[in-house]
Image: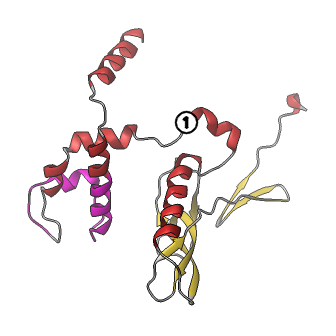
């Protein structure tokens, strides 16, 4: 056990520090991946065969596949020790959401016609505390956002994440999903 911990520490020490230009490239590759119509695993973007709008092998010109995975693994925006105090389900991405909100407000003024809509960022990952199941949506699992958009240009001005939990008569409700609350054991009463 101690040997494996020491081995893990040695592996982490061998990793190079993440540089600012690598973060910019990482975000650019994420945006390029979002624009690609085919939804594939990230490692498929480093294949060199030419297909579709983004020719294969393009990602490797900017960042190696292993470096991309390392940045995705170690990139954090908040201190995890403060999470218990806040009780915010969107804690890990709250700073990113706030920075996006400031940018949206600063760069564009909404016109006279405003649209209020809900959107779903598709994600089935179980570790996402904000994921919801919505049976009637094309993407049934994901994080729900209520968006304020310009009705003429479809520019998103505001998109707060929906992190609601309704408690009602012994059942815990989230949107589209119902789970039973655990009953206390007789020894704890």
Q: How far from the left and from the top, in percent, is residue 182?
A: 76, 44
Q: How far from the left and from the top, in percent, is residue 40?
A: 28, 60
Query: Which quadrant, please, contains the N terminus?
Result: top left
Queried whether the magenta region covers residue 44, the answer comes back as yes
Q: Quadrant of residue 6?
A: top left
Q: Is residue 128 visible?
A: no
Queried whether the magenta region covers residue 131, the answer comes back as no
159 relative position to 50: left or right: right
Quick one: 138 or 102, which is closer to the camera? 102
Mark 1 surroundings: few (<14), some (14-19) or many (≥20) residues within 10 A: few
Q: State the residue at coordinates (63%, 50%).
A: 89
**Relative to residue 162, is residue 37 depicted above or below?**
below
Q: Quadrant of residue 184?
A: top right
Quick one: 153 or 80, which is closer to the camera? 153
For the image shown, how many numbered marks are present on the structure? Answer: 1
Q: Tell me the SS state at disc 1.
A: loop
Q: State the residue at coordinates (35%, 20%).
A: 8
Q: State the residue at coordinates (49%, 53%).
A: 96
The magenta-colored residue range is 27-51
**Relative to residue 65, is residue 45 depicted above or below?**
below
16 relative position to 150: left or right: left
Q: State the residue at coordinates (27%, 45%).
A: 21
Q: How far from the left and from the top, in percent, is residue 146?
A: 59, 71
Q: Is residue 63 visible?
A: yes
**Relative to residue 128, is residue 185 depicted above or below?**
above
22 relative position to 64: left or right: right
181 relative position to 11: left or right: right
Query: Which quadrant, please, contains the C terminus?
Result: top right
Give the residue at mark 1: 79
């Amino acid at each position: 056990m101690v040997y494996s911990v020491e081995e893990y520490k040695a592996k982490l020490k061998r990793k190079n520090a993440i540089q600012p230009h690598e973060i910019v490239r990482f975000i650019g590759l994420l945006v390029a991946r979002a624009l690609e119509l085919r939804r594939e695993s990230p490692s498929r973007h480093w294949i060199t065969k030419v297909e579709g709008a983004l020719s294969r092998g393009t990602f490797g010109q900017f960042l190696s596949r292993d470096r991309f995975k390392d940045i995705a693994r170690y990139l954090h925006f908040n201190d995890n020790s403060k999470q218990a105090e806040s009780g915010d389900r969107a804690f890990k991405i709250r700073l990113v959401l706030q920075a996006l909100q400031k940018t949206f407000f600063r760069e564009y003024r909404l016109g006279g016609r405003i649209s209020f809509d809900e959107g779903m960022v598709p994600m089935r990952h179980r570790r996402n505390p904000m994921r919801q199941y919505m049976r009637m949506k094309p993407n049934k699992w994901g994080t729900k956002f209520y968006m304020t958009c310009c009705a003429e240009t479809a520019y998103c001005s505001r998109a707060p994440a929906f992190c609601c939990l309704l408690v009602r008569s012994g059942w815990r409700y989230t949107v589209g999903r119902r789970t039973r609350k655990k009953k206390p054991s007789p020894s704890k009463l």
